[in-house]
Amino acid sequence: MSDAWAQLHSHRNEFDDVSLGSLCDAQGRDDQFVHTVDELVVDLSRHLATEKTLDLLLGLAAERNVTGMRDAMFSGEPINTTEHRAVMHVALRNQSDRPMHVDGIDVMPDVRDVLARMKTFCDSIHDGSWQGSTGKKIEHVVNIGIGGSDLGPVMTTEALRPWWVSSVRTHFVSNVDPSHLADTLATLNPETTLFIVASKTFGTQETLANAHAARLWLVEALGENAVASHFVAVSTNAQRVNDFGIGTMFEFWDWVGGRYSMWSAIGLSIAVSIGFERFEQLLGGAHRMDMHFRNSPLEKNVPVLLGLLDCWYRECWNCQTRAVLPYDQHLLRLPAYLQQLEMESNGKHTRLDGSQTTHGTAFVVWGEPGTNGQHSFHQMLHQGTTMVPCDFLVAACSETPSPDNRHEILLANCLAQAEAMARGRTLEQVREELAAANLSPIEVDSLAPHKVMMGNRASTTMLYPRLDPAQLGAIISLYEHRVFVQGAIWGIDSFDQWGVELGKELANNILPGVLGDAPPSGDATSRRLTEHIAAMRAE
Ligand code: G6Q
């Protein structure tokens, strides 16, 4: 174990008798633990951390060369070593004049060129100059993509619902389950529907199967010639797009990882949903967070601090899961988006040098919008046997004006949950309360232990004035860099995803048996289940 980790492990023992409530009340706590990036307030005061913890974590960051890794990313070095690729999603939202180089070439002219084409396309959908094959205006856009070609766009589009352009509705189809496409198309008219087939490789089984089914739906209604005006593609592979028969393609590049691609043309569905100007605001918010990550000293660098605290809990507190609790209905899909961002990026056991990690990596990330979770799983967050660090996200102002005080109720609940987790309620407090409520001493004795809340449960609160495109861009960029910092500390490649390959290969091997074109294949269990499937389908 390295020096920095050893010191952190030993420091962890100092928390055995520490009360998080007292830490929060300490004078000057906010100076060190509350940070502001533009208008985003990130309150870290409810973390099981002291000044010494931060010093030790910053020592760990120095030992792991986090700044060197960060600078290598911004310089376009091929830090995704297992795929020999640069990691340059930051170039996609670079709104400065600074060139961004990959392999010695400034990628910014190409980035700007595609953005300009996206703008023209969006404008033509919105002003009706892009027409379907029968001359009708496009009213529905269906993004067909999966994983990184779906989760960012669908999360963002939902989050920015108040900014939707009224003339067009966007839909997302990802699952190869035929119900997903069928349910989506059920109310749509082919004459006014346009499909965006979003696939970096244009080789993904689920996306191509759905795209072919959508094409059939269109052609059956409007004929083969309709494809040109009802299908566009977003990809890095022009040849495959051409082979599919799509003439209009928006390009991106192999230095954009799938789960980091919503800022590229993969975000076309977002731009169509909210208008190109607001898409640029989304990019602008992300860019400002990039600059904060690139230029701020580490002790004030919010993605760095969050990533380091994540490693602290994962390693020294043995936390396995982290909850993301947006007190913001429009962030409904944020937990799902972050599941991919964090778990696909850092759920790995092999280090960059090929050795096996001796540390736990990645949290299971999960969550639901507040206050729904309070009436469901918060019981465990408050009184379960393991600590689940939580991210609370909330806007001071709602985008949905209401004459009553529902947003204020939401805000108060958000603050209250984090406070309850941090401070809990002691046995003495409970006993006093029960006695004051006139329970008999016997009743007090029997009920009191059940009402004790241990407290000392860590959380981050992210508070922003309103969830507008720029603010959302900043929040997502913050999470991306937080994940980067975790990966740098753990010494893993956060930008590959080799773990998803085996399942794809096995599915290809098993499919002919399921289709009935070949005897069942796979292992004994898969073959037996394939036989059951055949029997059930024959009935
Ligand atoms: C993301 C992953 C993965 C990918 C999908 C879709 O980082 O690589 O989720 O986005 O498998 O891939 P395509 O965009 O190539 O269809």
Image: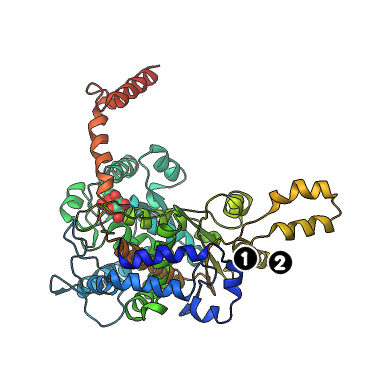
Mark 1 lies on residue = 419
Residue 322 drawn at (x, y percent): 47, 56
The picture places residue 46, in percent across and down from the top left corner, at 55, 68
Label 1's element?
helix
Q: Which residue is mark 2?
A: 404
Camera-side residue: 451 or 468? 451
Which numbered disc, 2 or 1, marks the residue that appears first in the sequence?
Answer: 2
Kindly identify the amino acid type of the residue bearing the numbered disc 1.
Glu
Who is closer to the viewer here, 253 or 19? 19
Foreground: disc 2 or disc 1: 1
Residue 240 drawn at (x, y percent) = 18, 50
Q: Which quarter of the picture shows residue 524? A: top left
Disc 1 crowd, CA 10 A, few/some/many (<14, 14-19, 20+) = some
Q: Quadrant of residue 259?
A: bottom left
Q: Is residue 107 above or below residue 517?
A: below
Q: Quadrant of the N terminus?
A: bottom left
Tell me if 390 is positioned left or right of 452 in this view: left
Q: Is residue 438 visible?
A: yes
Residue at the image position 17 percent from the left and 48 percent from the top: 243
Q: Secondary structure at mark 2?
A: loop
Quarter the C terminus occupies: top left
Identify the residue at image location x=24%, y=81%: 98
Q: Is residue 443 rendered to the left or right of residue 348?
A: right
In the rendering, at what x and y percent does residue 406 appear?
67, 64
